[in-house]
Amino acid sequence: METSLYEKMKARGIDMSWYEKGNKRNLPTETPLEDGECSKLSIYIIKKNGTLWTIDSSGNPYYNVRPGSKEIERDVYVCLHCKQQFKDMPVSHKPKSDF
């Protein structure tokens, strides 16, 4: 396997922190999606601009998980497990199959 220019420069002791910092910005982030079951942790908010956010305990956007792909009519809460949507933060949530 051929050694990349980056690896060669790093091996020579050249400071490559500028490259590493710039490269980190272009890498996809870990997406903390909780979709194994319907619970308070599986509720996220999709903002009007299309971005997906985790929420804090009061239902406010907390961490931007995914950039927006397309705009939507209004902010909407969604359960990532069952895909049920809510206008407001649900007080409690059961899977659709339990209704």
Image (cartoon, rainbow, N blue to C red):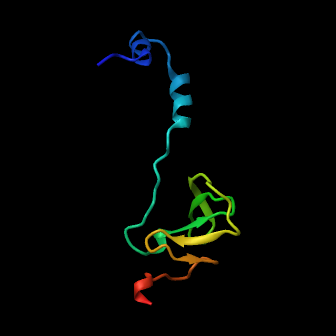
Quadrant assignment, res 8: top left
Quadrant assignment, res 85: bottom right
**84 and 43: which one is in front?**
84
Q: Position of residue 71 (x, y in %)?
A: 68, 60
Q: Is residue 8 above or below residue 20?
A: above
Q: Position of residue 68 (x, y in %)?
A: 62, 54
Q: Residue at x 61, y 64 (%)?
A: 46
Q: Residue at x 37, y 68 (%)?
A: 36
Image quarter of the C terminus:
bottom left
Image quarter of the N terminus:
top left
Task: Give the farthest residue toward the left.
Answer: 1
Q: Residue at x 49, y 45 (%)?
A: 29
Q: Residue at x 54, y 36 (%)?
A: 26
Quadrant assignment, res 33: bottom left
Q: Is residue 60 left or right of residue 20?
A: right
Task: Give the farthest residue toward the bottom.
Answer: 99
Task: Give the farthest residue toward the front.
Answer: 70
**5 and 13: which one is in front?**
5
**14 and 68: which one is in front?**
68
Q: Is residue 85 above or below residue 53?
A: below
Q: Position of residue 57 (x, y in %)?
A: 56, 70
Q: Is residue 68 left or right of residue 27?
A: right
Q: Is residue 91 above or below residue 71?
A: below
